[in-house]
Image: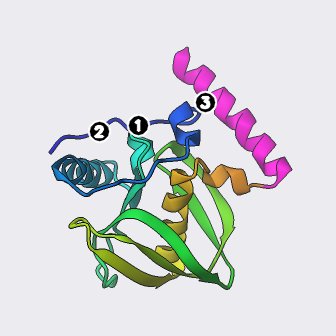
Amino acid sequence: MALLDICVYPDPVLRERARSIEKVDAAVRKLIDDMVETMYHAPGIGLAANQVGKPVRLIVVDLQREEDPHGLIVLVNPQIVQAEGQIVWEEGCLSVPDYFASVRRHETVCVRGLNADGEPVEMRADGLLAVALQHEIDHLDGRLFIDYLSPIKKDIFKRKWKKRVLEASA
């Protein structure tokens, strides 16, 4: 297993629509292992393949909480097939470090995809897990949580981000 570099906003790969994975083979399983190691090392609770420069439809999620019955979730070609309710959650992102904002999401989702063995899976999730799945699937469509901000909050984010970039390069 190897740690992968996490792409940081405004890296163009974060805005790409990821392509479907045709077959879960050894290369995909290696990418899964590397993404899981990278996510835990970051540390984060979710990671999409395009966040590590691989625009394919693959996410890994682990809430890393003892009360979470799911543990590590690997989804290949995930899609939300049902969503209901609304919840507002403060989100952050490994690709937008040190920035957090409240985002409105669906409270409950049903997601279908393939597991790490290429077998079909379907799961229902609510609360933080639903938010994390929506967040990571958004990445696969080239969307970031900052896209959900109001125009005023988006402007504030852009100014803070520009200042951060300038300070980092000084």
Q: Which mark is on residue 96?
A: none
Name the residue type under label 2: Leu
SS state under label 1? loop
Name the residue type under label 3: Arg
For image coordinates 72% across by 37% down, the residue present is 158
- In this rendering, position of residue 138 left or right of residue 30: right
Lower sequence index among marks 3 and 2: 2
Asked if disc 1 and disc 2 are in contact, CB closer than 8 Å, the reply is yes
Q: Which mark is on residue 4?
A: 2
Q: Does the magenta stretch include residue 74?
A: no
Residue farthest toward the front in the current orientation of the protein:
22
Q: Residue 143's spot in the image, x, y percent? A: 61, 50
Q: Residue 45's spot in the image, x, y percent? A: 39, 62
Residue farthest toward the top in the current orientation of the protein:
170
- Of marks 3 and 2, the one in the foreground: 2
Q: Which secondary structure class fits the magenta region best?
A: helix
- In this rendering, position of residue 88 left or right of residue 113: right
- Of marks 3 and 1, the one in the foreground: 1
Lower sequence index among marks 3 and 1: 1
For image coordinates 25% across by 51% down, the residue present is 28
Q: Name the residue under label 3.
A: 164
Where's the N terminus, which quadrant? top left
Q: Does the magenta stretch include residue 161?
A: yes
Q: Give the range drawn in magenta.
A: 150-170
- Of marks 1 and 2, the one in the foreground: 1
For image coordinates 31% across by 80% down, the residue present is 70
